[in-house]
Image: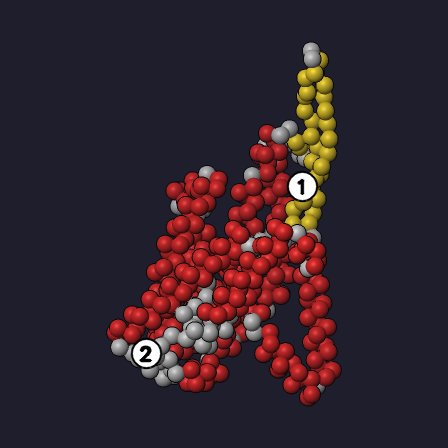
Amino acid sequence: MIDAFSLPDLRRKLLFTLGILVVFRFLAHIPLPGVDLDALGELFERNQLLGMLDMFSGGAMRNFSIVAMGVYPYITASIIMQLLVPVVPRLQALSQEGEAGRNKINLYTHWLMVPLAALQGYGQLVLLSQGDSVTETGTLPTVAIIFSLTAGTMFLVWMGELITERGIGNGISIIIFGGIVAGFPEMIGRGQFAARENMAGLIAFALLGLATVLFIVIFTEAHRRIPVHYSRSVFRGRRMYRQSGSTHIPLRVNSAGMIPLIFAMAMVILPGTVASYFTGASGIGGSIANFFVDWTAHWSYWLVYFLLVIAFAFFYTMVIFEQMNLADTLQKQGGFIPGVRPGRTTATYLSQVVTRITWGGALFLALIAV
């Protein structure tokens, strides 16, 4: 860390990122008007779905602040756009147009985020109104709260993009990380209280946490090296010389990083969010809605989460792999994999290797998730 601050450019990026996180945490403590925070706290103690949503917002939802929804609507919009790219010809063509095409898709994602944020804002308002947490339920206060929540999400996404451009790492992931870290002091306080009751259990939990971090680092850095040979002709004067060399392509076991966890979490929370609109219904519809509101306490929730992490790990890895277009790049640069014909055969071979090694990364991510 000391070495990082000795480099002017890196120091500037670190300070900029920290400054954005400070603004985020400040906004997380600005509550919306017309909310009874005491009643809201009691509701959070009874509803596990709200606890999961609160994790995405970094504690802002418990305060029902202007950034209570966090970046969750943007994540949902990103998932929808990623799923539409392979099936919509226009979007598929844009994805192959380089940086300009990706910027256009990102713009569409932002447009889609706005109605999703408004819809989710209304859903959260309905859910919180069940515990008499919202004291102002008129039309104008409802519209004002939904507008404020939508604007808060848009502002958070904008700050995340500022981190991506001028700070360190992926801005959206940093915002989520900042929200999770904000809950560490409370967790440490609970740990100190638990230590008085069971010190051996606390030590075992700490050792398990360290082992988990160790394995995460190992799987993050693990990769398979694919040997590549280069052979090209070079003209010097009137003579032609053959030059050759060798290198390797590092294919990561976990190319998708933590994105599958974020996407899967967004998807498993979605049914509970939608169900919150219908919790007051009677009959089988109300029973289904109540089941999904409390779904996080059921074993099927974790099974679906486990499977979604695996699915998104493969999906996101293949999206990245297709964008890299390694086979064509190798062929244009005069490179080849020993024992594999250039062109389509190389593309098939690399795809098979990526699929095999992704199984390890996907299963590991899924185990970490649950």
Q: Whole-Å distance between the Cαs marked 2 and 1?
A: 56 Å
Indicate the secondary structure of the residue bearing disc 2: loop
Three-letter code for the amino acid on which mark 2 is drawn: Ala
33 and 262: which one is in front?
Answer: 33
Side of 243 where 142 appears, left or right: left
Q: x, y percentage for residue 11?
A: 62, 55
Q: Residue at x 47, y 59 (%)?
A: 159
Which quarter of the figure is the N terminus placed in? Answer: bottom right
Q: Residue at x 40, y 54 (%)?
A: 110
Three-letter code for the amino acid on which mark 1 is drawn: Ile
Q: Quadrant of residue 272?
A: bottom left
355 and 320: which one is in front?
Answer: 320
Q: From this viewpoint, which residue is outermost toward the bottom?
A: 197
Q: x, y percentage for residue 316?
A: 53, 52
Q: Is residue 102 above or below residue 25?
A: above
Q: Which badge, 2 or 1, is on the more N-terminal residue? A: 1
Disc 2 packing (10 Å; few <14; some 14–19; many ≥20): few
Q: Quadrant of residue 139?
A: bottom left
Do callouts 2 and 1 mark residues in contact (Cβ within 8 Å)?
no
Disc 1 packing (10 Å; few <14; some 14–19; many ≥20): few
Q: Which residue bears the numbered disc 2?
A: 281
Q: Quadrant of residue 36?
A: bottom left
Q: Which residue bears the numbered disc 1?
A: 249
